[in-house]
Image (cartoon, rainbow, N blue to C red):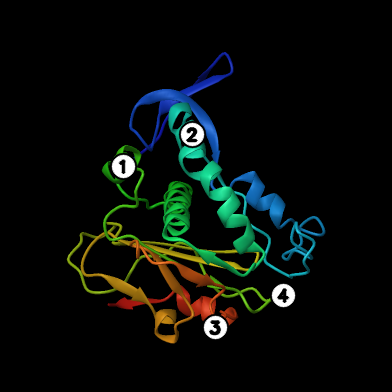
Amino acid sequence: MRRRVRTVGGVATGVCPVCGQTETMNIEDVLPQWVRRHATSVAPGAAFTGTLASGAPFNAPVPFKITVRVGQPCNTWMGERFEAPVKPVLLPLLDGVAQRLTWVDQELIGRWVTKTALMNALAHPPHPDLAVYQAFRRSGNPPPGSRVLLGIYSSPGVLPKTRQGFRYAGPGTAPPGTLEFLPFNAILGQLVIVFCLPMQGPPVRTVAEAESALIGIWPPTRLPITWPPSIGLDAAGVEAASLWELA
């Protein structure tokens, strides 16, 4: 979907890519500022952080900064529905704090990760159709088939060779140019986030799941989990987490 924005008197209006309505447009941070401030660079242009905001030393990759234009009502809704509730749950995970994640905590994180992945897709097309975003706007839940997994990063100072955007190359009958699979990976402090949404064909799983280094939190398990997992993800493990196979 091509998005056109018109600016008159300093006010930008356009069709919101989330709800499809013509609205005053706002800038949406794919990663909120409080995430980026929690693991900031020690020097301009540096690839790694020196410490987390807690003061704990950890040479993590600097969080990316990407913005997209969305309608003001949807921008406000995402802040209130996802970002504000998840903040007190998510920040300790960035620091690798040992804790017990309730099923409510897991669902908060799963919804926020999905919001982040869908916004990131708008900045890196191809992205899902408007109908997918509209359904997400109505329900606030990840689209059917979505998977969210978490791991803990054990290779400080090393950047894995991963790319956030690619198309699933498995068997399928989708026309050329059709988005068959939406992936999203991120390293935030000591937290590894893995998201996938199969748009066509059978369910998939990440290669790293076989080693029990990733914990699935969406679809909801309704069971508490102990954090962090006993097995960490090094750079090679994060690379494996970006590879998918038929489930």
Q: Which residue is mark 1?
A: 139
Q: Nearer the viewer, residue 19 or 94?
A: 94
Residue furthest to the top in view is 9
* Relative vertical location of residue 246 with respect to residue 17 in this rendering, above or below: below
Q: Secondary structure at mark 1?
A: helix
Badge 3 local density, few (<14 within 10 Å), some, or many (20+)?
some
Label 3, label 2: how many angstroms apart (C-alpha)? Answer: 37 Å
Label 2, label 4: how many angstroms apart (C-alpha)? Answer: 34 Å
Give the x, y percent position of residue 99: 58, 67
Residue furthest to the bottom in view is 211
Give the x, y percent position of residue 142: 34, 52
Q: Nearer the viewer, residue 180 or 94?
A: 94
Label 4, label 1: how many angstroms apart (C-alpha)? Answer: 39 Å
Asked whether the beta carbons under mark 4 and mark 3 sit within 8 Å of each other, the answer is no
In the rendered view of the protein, which quadrant contains the C terminus?
bottom left
Q: Inspect the image, locate mark 4, and give the three-letter code of the amino acid beneath it.
A: Gly
On the image, which quarter does residue 144 sit in? bottom left
Which is more N-terminal, label 1 or label 4? 1
Horizontally, residue 181 falls left or right of residue 42, namely left
Asked whether the beta carbons under mark 4 and mark 1 sit within 8 Å of each other, the answer is no
Foreground disc of the pair 1, 2: 1
Label 1, label 3: how many angstroms apart (C-alpha)? Answer: 34 Å
Q: Inspect the image, locate mark 2, and give the three-letter code of the amino acid beneath it.
A: Asn
- Tag on residue 157? 4
Residue furthest to the left in view is 173
Q: Inspect the image, locate mark 3, and give the three-letter code of the amino acid beneath it.
A: Ile
Q: Which residue is mark 2?
A: 75
Which is more N-terminal, label 3 or label 4? 4
Give the x, y percent position of residue 185: 49, 64
